[in-house]
Amino acid sequence: MTTAPALDSKQQAAVDAAQVAVQSRGYWTTVGGRIRDDKVTMVCGLVVLLIVFSAVFADLIALADPYKASMLKRLAEIGAPGYPLGADEMGRDMMTRLLYGGRLSLFMGISPIVIAFVIGGTLGLVAGFLGGRVNMAIMRVMDVFYAFPSVLLAVAISGALGAGIGNAIVSLTLVFIPPITRVTESVTTQVRSLDYVEAARASGARSLTIIRVHILSNVLGPVFIYATSLISVSIILASGLSFLGLGTEPPEPEWGLMLNTLRQSIYVNPWVAALPGVMIFFTSLSFNLLSDGLRSAMDVRL
Amino acid sequence: MTRAPDAKDGALLEVRELRKYFPVRGGILNRAVGWVQAVDDVDFDVLPGEVLGIVGESGCGKSTTARLLMHLIRADAGRIAFDGEAVRPDDAAGLRELRRRMQMVFQDSYSSLNPRLPIEDTIMFGPKVHGVSAAEARERARELFSLVGLDPAQFIRRYPHELSGGQRQRVNIARALALEPRLLILDEAVSALDKSVEAQVLNLLLTLRRELGLTYIFISHDLNVVQYMSDRVLVMYLGKVVEIGPTAEIYERMQHPYTEALLSAMPSMDPDRRTETPPLVGDPPNPIDPPPGCRFHTRCRFAESVCSRAEPRLGPAAGQDAANGAGHLVACHMRVAGSGHSQAPA
């Protein structure tokens, strides 16, 4: 502190970058090798990539306008000319709407997890590292959220805030902060009591340095894996909110909402009516299996 | 060149009345319902250049003492002076400086290394914290690798899980030395190693001490190893110092019945020195509620009523040969003239 001049920020950044680069070579090559050997994970990874890719580039892939309705083509069969996946109850091209729907569904599913990862991760890190009263305060507040089943909580918050994409994301974020906080807290508490953290403290390092160098690198992995495993749940919950009319509003294409509007047509054209559900199922399953595979690949009990 | 322990130098580390009680919490309000008297009024000096061994059973406060010295946990009372300078626990800059001059090697060679960092980065961490540039820290790490007998070219980028236990403990020693300390606390540093590896690491420690002029506090439960390593030995029982003195004095002319029992439990290759009867029976009493008077009286075969009434103070043994017994202190009523114990000298 007072005794020695600190590294200037550029030097420090270079040191950190070097450290990260070398670190990733050792650890991530191991993980990469394991993933390549795991066929299920590779396939799921490809499916996820395909879904994300087609959602992002929906503009380029889609053949039609997702909002353009046609009375004549209502509930067209799968494979009808010009309608490779049929048409919905208003005669809009299903394939186009599924592609565009993926955008909203993925966005509404993933963004709450990302926000919750940042907020919950920070809260858990603080609670775990400081312990004592701070830990008590943070974790007891989280327990209050735990008292409600997650679906109910999401519906309740969305209902209170009103329909809309933004509000749905807020409510889903609030649902996912407590579990992420809890996992981060428990991992941090575990890591904090290990001898290498003691040794770092014994070398005179400040808490922030210890967190940055020794705690984060050991906490981030497990919490990241846990957060990815929540994406599948989040996608289902987001679609569920839209299905209930608490998320996106018509005529926006969104898988959950599409499932709802096609519900009445299930006896007329069950195959087309089931398509949004199939998409939700495959997306959620792929994310789930992918995070499972990632977990076993990254769980190097060194 | 071996630096002989020289009283004229003054003590490198002075510890006075060091005390740590851990609260035992219970009840709905999580209040302290009792106190574990882990370290209770411990006094000792460490002389420059010496190896002070600390022995005792599990739970007698050896490791707590080490952590108190490093200020990893806060002492309830007591004074610590390093090199004649008092250490104030509230003075952050002073503590940082103290931690540069005093380092510690932990028992568990695995959990004391960050599994996500190459060992080179682990060694560079301390110097970087103290403002050494990355290039210089890297240079120093390479030197330290050679010093502890690991080939830098081969080991520097490895991760802890790619090393054996002995190699990891060498890395831990290098990490502790990276800040160029004068005093190294070795808390059961070799206890978890195989016997052959243990011997190598012990010899490495002795070489390093000679070459770098280090002072060690060597904590162990292995009496043979302590005898091999130490210039002086401190015996602890239930948070108290029961006896302290030069190694030869302690091992050959022990004054305290606990030391005697401890040493007779030492495994020996000599059949004539083997004992058939256990020297001590039972476990040490609960440190939450230590017995009054001498803490050892519940297991001592010489215990008399005075032992459960008054606590013996650490002092020179009465009637001891002054020339041989220099610096040999013991806390036992049998060695204090007129203490009221039937075996005490008159």
Image (cartoon, rainbow, N blue to C red):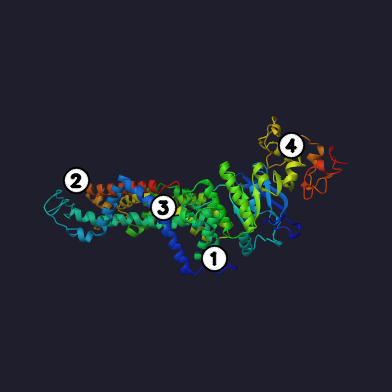
Label 3 amino acid? Answer: Tyr
At 52% from the left and 66% from the top, the residue drawn is: B133
As helix, strand or loop, the secondary structure at mark 1 comes to loop
* Residue B246 located left or right of residue A223: right
**Total count of labels:** 4
> Disc 4 vs disc 1: which is toward the camera?
1
As helix, strand or loop, the secondary structure at mark 2 comes to helix
In the image, residue B124 sits, relative to residue B58, either above or below, namely below
**Residue at image mark 1:** B132
Residue A253 in view: no
Q: Specify the subunit that label 2 lies on.
A: A
* Quarter of the rendering occupied by the N terminus of chain A: bottom right
Give residue B275's position: percent from left, percent from top. 70, 32
Label 4 amino acid? Answer: Thr
Pick the residue in front: B215 or A77. Answer: B215
Give residue A122's position: percent from left, percent from top. 46, 57
**Residue at image mark 3:** A27
Pick the residue in front: A242 or A236. Answer: A236
**Residue at image mark 2:** A271
Residues marked 3 and 4, same chain: no
Label 1 amino acid? Answer: Val
Separation of residues labelled 4 and 1 (CA atoms): 54 Å
